[in-house]
Amino acid sequence: MDVDMVNMFVLAGGTLVIPILAFFASFYMWPAVIIHVYHWYWRRRLGMQVDYLENRGYRFSYSHRGKPGPGRPSILLLHGFSANKDMWLPMAKFLPKHHHLVCVDMPGHEGTSRTDATDYSIEGQVARIRQFVEAVRLTKRPFHLVGTSMGGNVAGVYAARYPNDLCSLTLICPAGLPNDSLFAKRLRELEEEQKLSGSPEAQGIPLIPSTTEEMEDMLKLCSFIRFKIPQQILQGLVDVRLPNNDFYRELFMEVVGEKSRHSLKENMHLITAPTQVIWGKQDQVVCIQGASMLEEAVSGCQVDLLDNCGHSVVMERPRKTAQLIMDFINRLHNNSSGSNNSKKLS
């Protein structure tokens, strides 16, 4: 359940950009605007173009770079809970510029249509992503699918449902598995408090902050690295999220509900694509034991565990994550090419 939070710090190293952002946020008193402008700047600098696609009355928002080419599969990236396509910018910086990248806003997030709970369950999200994949014609050749947290749950179930679409799969700290993390324990406490109070509304969810203090707590929960973030930037991050908090609560209750909570566990035995799992050893949101479950259930699964890294792998270790993904893709392609050459020689 990654969150769109500290792209600017990881992406630019934080040394010069943070003070500049803080100055302008303070001067203009529009910290949320500064956040949007910053993402716009880095999309342009990294060559990521934003487009919108209308299909059967539904709108998808996505960013993309490069074109499909021989020997290099397209890479589709699915973000986590309450994030958006821009969360991949830190990692895109370290991926080959010629490689075809597609980052889509998940259902209800950012520029993608917001409808109802039927689209927010994991199965509903898988159906919408399949709709997007067909509409942008990614199915012309097998592509590499990457998903993190909630997006990892969706990616894993997608791989089980549509095996012929994929050449390979990367799951980063995926949700949808039995979870005994610090975060999961806190959720169980909240459920008990909710039952005792008789309130039907989900309140106090650590991934849905409404104040700068709650935002700081969320960052500590999601990241092993401790970022020193100016108060103005924290306020900007809160301001960007506040209008969407009702949606986030509805979405959250759907993905942790009975239908979706263990979707990946229920489908992982059906995954046939070559699979890579990347996990931060200090993940407090989704228990790292999920990596062992996937390794046992998915034939030939490759597991990479990162030291001194929490749940927000893409934010905390963007260079390493990009390297691991590209090494995995290149190794598969080289093995495939070698196999084809052997067939030709024989």
Image (cartoon, grey):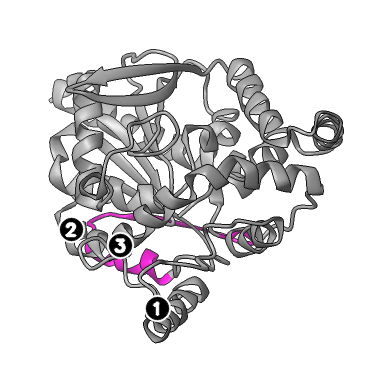
In the displayed structure, 176 sits above or below 147; it is: below
Mark 1, secondary structure of its residue: helix
Amino acid under label 2? Asn
Whether tag 1 and tag 3 are in contact, CB under 8 A, the answer is no
Mark 3 packing: few (<14 Cα in 10 Å), some, or many (20+)?
many
* Bounds of the magenta segment: 289-310
Residue 298 shown in magenta: yes
x, y percent for residue 301: 31, 55
Residue 14 appears left or right of 1? right
Determine which of the numbered discs, if any, sits on residue 294 in the image.
3
Q: From mark 2 to mark 3, how far is it between C-alphas?
A: 10 Å
- In the rendered image, which residue does mark 1 sit on? 191
In the image, what residue occupies the spot 85% across and 32% down? 16
Mark 3, secondary structure of its residue: helix
Residue 336 appears left or right of 110? left
- In the rendered image, which residue does mark 2 sit on? 267
x, y percent for residue 287: 44, 70
Mark 1 packing: few (<14 Cα in 10 Å), some, or many (20+)?
some
Front position among marks 1 and 3: 1
Foreground pick, 323 / 67: 67
In the image, what residue occupies the spot 66% across and 64% down? 217
- Note whether residue 273 is visible: no
Residue 339 shown in magenta: no
